[in-house]
Amino acid sequence: MFRFILPRSLALASLVAVTFTTNAFAHCFVGARFLPATLLTDDPCVADEMSIPTVGWSKTADVPPASQLDLSIDFSKRITENFGVTFSQGWTQIRQPDGTVASGFGNLTTAFQFQVLKDPSHELAVLTGLAVDWGHTGSTASGFADRFSHITPTINIGKGFGDLPDSVGWIRPFAVTAQVGYQIPTDSFDFTQNVFNPQQLVYGGTLQYSMPYLKSEVIDLGLPEFINHLIPLVEVSLTTPMANNFGNPSTTTGTVNPGVIWVGSYFQVGIEAMIPINRESGTGVGVLAQLHLYLDDMFPRSVGQPLFGGTSTPTRKLTF
Amino acid sequence: MRISIPAAAILLAVMPSTGIQAHAFLDHAEPRVGSTVPTAPREVALFYTQNLEAAFSTVEVSDTNGARVDLGKPTISASTMRVGLKQLPPGTYRVRWQVLSVDTHTTQGSFTFHVKQ
């Protein structure tokens, strides 16, 4: 079977598919803080946004390694002000050293997300969600999608350091985000592959430094405008088998991604290096890039609005 | 759900011509964010990336004790908001602002500037 021919390739493809397709890519303001949509992990807000596309290139952990290309599209829509749904679809191509090429779609993923908390004064946001990777909706015959579904309850947290005192002003542009999910397959055993389907902890986060925040909240250094739109960051995304993993490796896999996001008024562009954390996670350094559109800014009076609840326009004059 | 890359390019291409607006970011301020000025300024001017809704935008300037040192109601024209200041002695002052862009998005922020001793 395909999994026995390309075990590490498929494992990595699955990992990438999972991490790509659980992103919500929300336009995330918390007080003075803007948390950008990050490429590998989710940010802690619901919004109306679209990533089109996210492109990844890497080399698999096989010996010799194969080249892997991943394309994905995400569309996030708020149903109400605090509840949203994300639809995600990915496509993967694996090219073997001998020139053999295999490609296919991953399963369709929908993520239902609820904004639990936004605390502007502490730049804190909390989001809970349930991602469902629908079995049999992708290229199951070629091995790029499972015949069963995955259900992943997830929590996302974002925190800016803007509430630190002015005496440490240079630290205030930092922010962290974290994501923890527990992925449960709907079938515990895959009879076609003759392997157990493990339950997995899917987790990660980001450390980011906002140049826009530095300029508007701490000190305007008169830097070139392009620099003032950058958010350098490091992302980490990991997967660890937790249960029902008999006969499979129990190794944690994932990547560490240093990169940068350029933030505009209507879209952002991000690029990251993908560094595998171990031999089981890949070979060499890959690349991940994304164009991300802010639908709530592009179309604020139509698709950029929640389906129910309408505009968030204040009904009274703002006071501090 | 699947939208092609050319479709995204079209979306980006039509944006400027449709007159759409976005969140209003603070582009720059006078006095500059975090700066030290040699003499007390007569006003604080805030320049944003989008036009503002005057009725829902406000700014406040206070000293280190929290006492207001601005002259009250700001004047707003397009993407600029200005507020007059009382005579400021040397010290550190915090500017807190909250604005609504014309497309109904709210943003907020604060920063300090210093008047030289």
Image: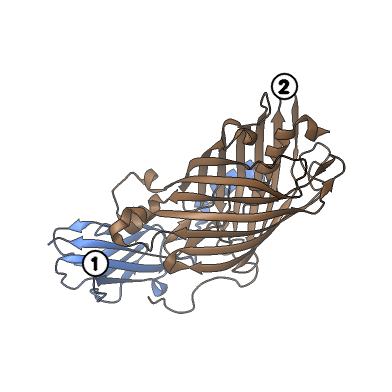
Chain colours: A brown, B blue
Q: Quadrant of the N terminus of chain A?
A: top right
Vertical placement of residue A107 versus A96, above or below: below
Badge number at residue B93: 1
The picture places residue B83, in percent across and down from the top left corner, at 27, 70
The kind of secondary structure element at disc 2 is loop
The picture places residue B18, in percent across and down from the top left corner, at 53, 55
> Which residue is at 65% across, 61% downward?
A129
> Which residue is at 29% across, 48% downward?
A222
> Which residue is at 70% across, 37% downward?
A92
Q: Residues within 10 Å of mark 1 (few under 14, many from 20)?
A: many
Q: Is residue A27 visible?
A: yes
The residue lying furthest to the left in this view is: B117
Mark 2 to mark 1: distance in Å?
66 Å
Q: Circle 2 marks a residue in which chain?
A: A
Q: Quadrant of residue B80?
A: bottom left
Q: Nearer the viewer, residue B50 or A82?
A: A82
Taking the image as shown, residue B98 lies to the left or right of residue A181, namely left
The picture places residue A109, in percent across and down from the top left corner, at 72, 52
The picture places residue B46, in percent across and down from the top left corner, at 31, 62
Answer yes or no: do the residues labelled 2 and 1 have beta carbons within 8 Å? Answer: no
The kind of residue tagged 2 is Gly
Residue highlighted by disc 2: A99
